Amino acid sequence: MSKNKVILAFCTKGQISPSVYFDTLRLVASGVIDGVLASCGTILPQTRNTAICSALQQDPDLTHLLFIDDDVSGVLPEMVQSLIDADKPIISPVTNGRQAPFKPHLRVEDIPKLIKQLEAPQDKREVIEVIGIGMGCTLIKAEVLEAIAEIGDDRKHLTWFTFDREPRE
């Protein structure tokens, strides 16, 4: 089986906190990620789209793109490795909102599933399927990104993230 090739994509408004910087150094030193790129901008969907384009152009052997927003810290190599090992198309650890009350980024419908997992001993917890996740720390397989790209009218602009809430085909 071939080795995974994971690129870390920071989506930032321009500054990365010292704690996130050190988390990144730890991830690079561990070997769990194979490269880092930053995408700066104030319009988050556009910033994410730019990161994806850059990653796919930069490395055609890319197997996963790991999004970490500039306000998410505490991402450990073991956590990232567990996301990779889960072998899911899109996966995210439970992360909390950045403002009080600090609650998980989950839809109300998914909270009972999370509570059930948290009540289980740590070594018995499993990946749960949810309706939606926050994107602050999310691992996406490259094959998913390639499958859902929407090509713009200019045939060059690719779109994965938008502001619309309408379902896409």
Image (spheres, rainbow, N blue to C red):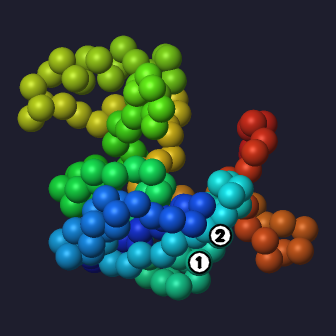
Give the number of marks.
Answer: 2
Q: Nearer the viewer, residue 162 or 156?
A: 162
* Residue sitting at x 48%, y 32%: 99
Residue 135 relative to residue 85: left or right: right
| Residue 61 visible in the snapshot | yes
* Quadrant (top left, top right, bottom left, bottom right) of the N terminus: bottom left
Q: Is residue 124 above or below residue 113?
A: below
* Residue sitting at x 34%, y 32%: 128
Tell me the quarter of the picture where residue 150 sits. Answer: bottom right
Residue 126 relative to residue 12: left or right: left
Residue 146 relative to residue 38: left or right: right
Q: Amino acid at mark 1?
A: Ser
Q: Position of residue 117 (x, y in %)?
A: 24, 24
Tell me the quarter of the picture where residue 160 sits. Answer: bottom right
Quote the CA–CA distance across marks 1 and 2: 6 Å
Tell me the quarter of the picture where residue 87 sits. Answer: bottom left
Q: Position of residue 104 (x, y in %)?
A: 41, 29
Residue 54: numbered disc:
1
Q: Secondary structure at mark 2?
A: helix
* Residue sitting at x 89%, y 74%: 154
Cβ atoms under marks 1 and 2 closer than 8 Å? yes
Q: Is residue 120 above or below residue 68?
A: above
Q: Position of residue 20 (x, y in %)?
A: 35, 60
Q: Amino acid at mark 2?
A: Thr
Report crowding for label 1: few under 14, some 14 to 19, many 20 or more residues within 10 A (C-alpha). some
Residue 28 relative to residue 124: left or right: right
Residue 130: numbered disc:
none
Mark 2 lies on residue: 50
